[in-house]
Image (cartoon, rainbow, N blue to C red):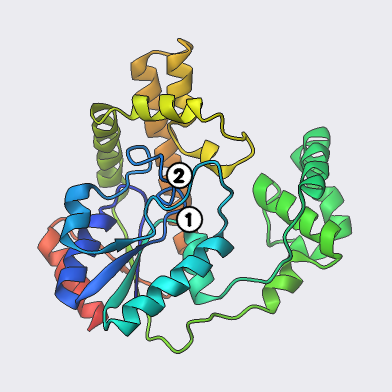
Amino acid sequence: MLLLAGPTASGKSNLAIELAKKLNGEIINADSMQVFKEFKILSSRPTLNQTKKVKHHLYGIISVKKHFSAGDWLKYVKKKIDSCVKRKKIPIIVGGTGLYFNAIIKGMSKIPDIDLKTRNIVRKLYKKKGYKKFYNHLLKVDPKIKGRILPTDAQRLQRAYEVKLKTNKSLFDWFSNTKSEFTDFEISKIFIDTPRDILLKKISSRTEQMFKKKCVSEVKKFNNLKVNKSLSVNKLIGVQEINDFLNNSISLEQCKDLINIKTRQYAKRQNTWARGHMKNWNKLYSKNFSNLLKKSLKVVS
């Protein structure tokens, strides 16, 4: 099995296709936004032309109206990997969602589902206290979070609190009992380590392409679906910015600039994640695509 990660706009899709051709492989999505049916353009899903070249799995499989977690993805991906193995195909897992790769390498904890009532209690408490007071309060309830969750990481803080509230166990106690379900696999790991200046140009260029492909229409259709605001799909970069443009709050140029800024920030977070969680991965880059392909093939062989 090959895991292929990298920041947004680093060229993972094209590299994955060429690797799949050379290795007799099939591509499986590991991007949390590319699973949604309704967002082809804004999520930068592989194009029809790309998916014709090699078999792609788990792209555009879920409605934006549904909650979709890393645990859900793991259930889907296990079936796809088993299917590839049966057909003697190499599974190539491609994406930028660190949690998905962690789920394969380290496994997923069997935390019970958290009900909406508990979630809402925690959200209201976070809003009322603000991040500093909430963090200090959580430290008293669950001291194991110290040094493991940043005081500014709203999502993980709230997650840790709701788990402790619901199960009376620390999030990290649940984590310590997890193990990978893929220990029998030989796993090669590649991270495309694109230099910052090159990545910034690629991001700007891709934003322009999205607007040429009518990403504004995509957001209009999404708005008509009246999706629950608490669902993660609302965080997709471009949704808020395009809506601000549609409401005449900002100009088209400002909209594009904001999308570029947010995408750069996201790429930075992906690179930070890689430094912390992907230390033993092969970090590869070459300006020349065929060189990058050669380097990648060496890792797999």
> Which residue in the protein does label 2 denote?
266
Query: Which element type, helix, strand or loop, lies under badge 1?
Result: helix
> Which residue in the protein does label 1 denote?
272
The image shows residue 40 at horizontal and vertical percentages of: 34, 41
Q: Residue at x 88, y 58 (%)?
A: 141
Q: Relative to 156, say whether 181 is above or below.
A: below
Left or right side of 144 for 7:
left
Left or right side of 15 for 110:
right
Left or right side of 78 for 84:
left
The image shows residue 262 at horizontal and vertical percentages of: 44, 35
**Among the two numbered marks 1 and 2 on one chain, the one whose residue lies closer to the N terminus:** 2
Q: Nearer the viewer, residue 214 or 256?
A: 214
Determine the image quadrant of residue 122: top right
Q: Residues within 10 Å of mark 2 (few under 14, many from 20)?
A: some
Q: Residue at x 20, y 69 (%)?
A: 19
Query: Which element type, helix, strand or loop, lies under badge 2?
Result: helix
- Quick one: quadrant of the C terminus? bottom left
What residue occupies the far top of the structure in this picture?
A: 248
| Distance of label 1 from label 2 (alpha carbons) | 10 Å
What amino acid is at disc 1? Answer: Thr
